[in-house]
Image (tube, rainbow, N blue to C red):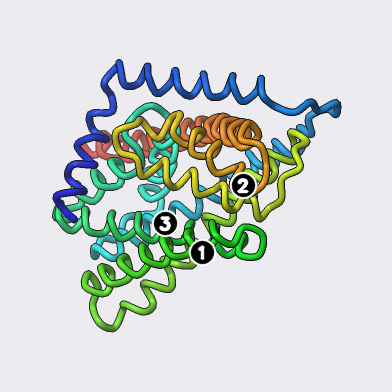
Amino acid sequence: MRAFLDRVLRAREGSQNPWLLIAALGAFIAFTIFGIRALPHIDKPIRWELIVIAGLVCVPVIVVLNALEFRLMAHFAQHHPPMLEIVQITVMGSAANLLPMPGAVMVRLASLRKAGVRVTRGLNLTAIIGLAWLGTAGVLGGVVQIWSHTAFALAALAIGATLLSIGTIMLARALEPGTRVAGALELLAIECAFILMQSLRLFLVAAALRFDVSYAQTTTLAIATVAAAAIGFLPSGLGAREGIAAVLAPIVGFPAAVGLVITAVDRLVSLAVLSVLAGIVTFTTRRQRRQQLVPASDGD
């Protein structure tokens, strides 16, 4: 497992190769243009208020959930970072997951390593969080489709349950006996809330664009986000997420072009909001550092 993680993380670190970035960006643009051209005709205006809600409400809530996840991960490693550091790591990591650069995994590992957490333990906890995220997405995506698309639902449930089981076993080995149940339940709650909020964001984008897509369908579509993030050799899954969404969409009952465009617009909305949040966090951090330097200068 650790050898596999080492290869994935090295691939992520190498994702700044300019040709790979160009290829990923080209795939994203090509998929989006193809999806827009293949969309069914809609003669109603875009509901911009839903786009605003998806960006200004859902994105910050997801950032909070990511912060809780990183805080829990740090506590598993006996590291208790201050709130400002948690927010900074979370926002920068979330933005990195949307941009053509190494994602939140690298940002989190760097923070834990700086705090003195061993690389092997950081890798182990990263694997546990990733398995919980992937497994939860598979289980929830399968549950909501169990009556309408049974074959797909059973496959998603089987894969998701297997990943969750592996993650739970690894977590039990990583934690002390008295903290295992509480830690597992807290992690599962965070991952469930994350997937459901991500699904709500996709649902709002779909409704804003006047697509007839249910919340159950966007819950399944959220699997594309998780699966693309797990692909280490593409920068932040750029293009991969949209391609996976196009494959999943017809399986759960709506056109591939619709799934592709929904995820592409969702990426752009998230990137816009996260860019603003990243700017605020950067400004706040620099201001705090300047305030800390002033007393030191006065003392001299």
Residue 270: x, y in percent? 55, 36
212 or 66: nearer the eye?
Answer: 212
Indicate the secondary structure of the residue bearing disc 1: helix
Quarter that holds the N terminus: bottom left
Image: 211 above or below 19: below
Q: Nearer the viewer, mark 1 or mark 3?
A: 1
Kind of element beneath mark 3: helix
In the displayed structure image, the side of residue 150 where residue 76 appears, left or right: left
- Mark 1 → mark 3, Cα distance in angstroms: 18 Å
Residue highlighted by disc 3: 133
- The C terminus lies in quadrant: top left
Kindly report the distance in space between the C-alpha atoms of the residues bearing marks 2 and 3: 18 Å
Rendering quarter of residue 249: top right
Callout 2–callout 3 Cβ contact below 8 Å:
no
Q: Say how many tags the image has.
A: 3
Point 41% across, 55% down: residue: 134
- Dot 1 or dot 2: first in sequence order is 2
Q: Residue pushed farthest bottom?
A: 178
- What amino acid type is highlighted by mark number 1? Leu
Q: Is residue 135 left or right of residue 211?
A: left
* Residue carrying label 1: 154
Disc 1 to disc 2, how far (Cα)? Answer: 29 Å
Amino acid type at image mark 3: Trp
Find out whether the residues at labels 1 and 3 contact each other: C-beta distance under 8 Å.
no
Residue appearing at x 31%, y 34% in the figure: 102
Mark 1: few/some/many CA within 10 Å (<14, 14-19, 20+)? some
* Mark nearer the N terminus (1 vs 3): 3
Q: Amino acid at mark 2?
A: Cys
What residue is pinned by disc 2?
58
Residue pictured at 19% horizontal, 48% vertical: 4
Going by the image, does 95 lie left or right of 102? Answer: right
Secondary structure type for disc 2: helix
